[in-house]
């Protein structure tokens, strides 16, 4: 949360800037990008965990 409030660049900055200038499209786009990145990272970690657990049991 602190990074979101004091950021000077990046997606968090775009979300905060968009909310300050009442640009809802910019805010929603930033949130959607964060959701997609979070989901992709979750899938990667989930698959990595499955591979590591399978290798450990063999």
Image (cartoon, rainbow, N blue to C red):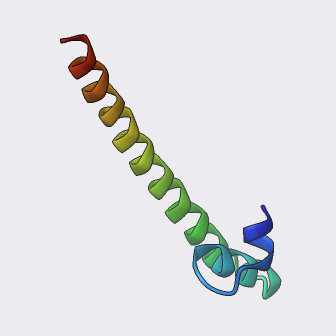
Count of labels shown? 0
* Residue 21 appears left or right of 58: right
The residue furthest top is 57
Q: Is residue 5 above or below residue 41?
A: below
Q: Is residue 35 above or below residue 2?
A: above
* Residue 15 appears left or right of 44: right
Residue 35 pos. (x, y %): 53, 54
* Residue 22 appears left or right of 30: right
Q: Nearer the viewer, residue 35 or 44?
A: 44
Q: Nearer the viewer, residue 14 or 2?
A: 2
Q: Is residue 53 above or below residue 23?
A: above
Residue 11 pos. (x, y %): 58, 75
Residue 51 pos. (x, y %): 25, 28
Q: Nearer the viewer, residue 1 or 23?
A: 1
- Quadrant of residue 7 in the image? bottom right
Q: Is residue 52 above or below residue 16?
A: above
Q: Residue at x 38, y 33 (%)?
A: 46
Residue 3 pos. (x, y %): 73, 69
For the N terminus, the quadrant is: bottom right
Q: Residue at x 18, y 12 (%)?
A: 58
- Quadrant of residue 45 in the image? top left
Q: Residue at x 21, y 21 (%)?
A: 55
Q: Nearer the viewer, residue 12 or 49?
A: 49
* Residue 24 appears left or right of 49: right
């Amino acid at each position: 949360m602190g990074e979101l409030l004091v950021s000077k660049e990046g997606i968090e900055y775009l979300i905060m800037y968009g909310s300050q200038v009442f640009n809802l499209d910019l805010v929603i786009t930033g949130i959607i990008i964060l959701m997609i990145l979070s989901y992709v990272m979750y899938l990667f970690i989930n698959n990595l965990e499955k591979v590591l657990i399978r290798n450990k049991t063999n």
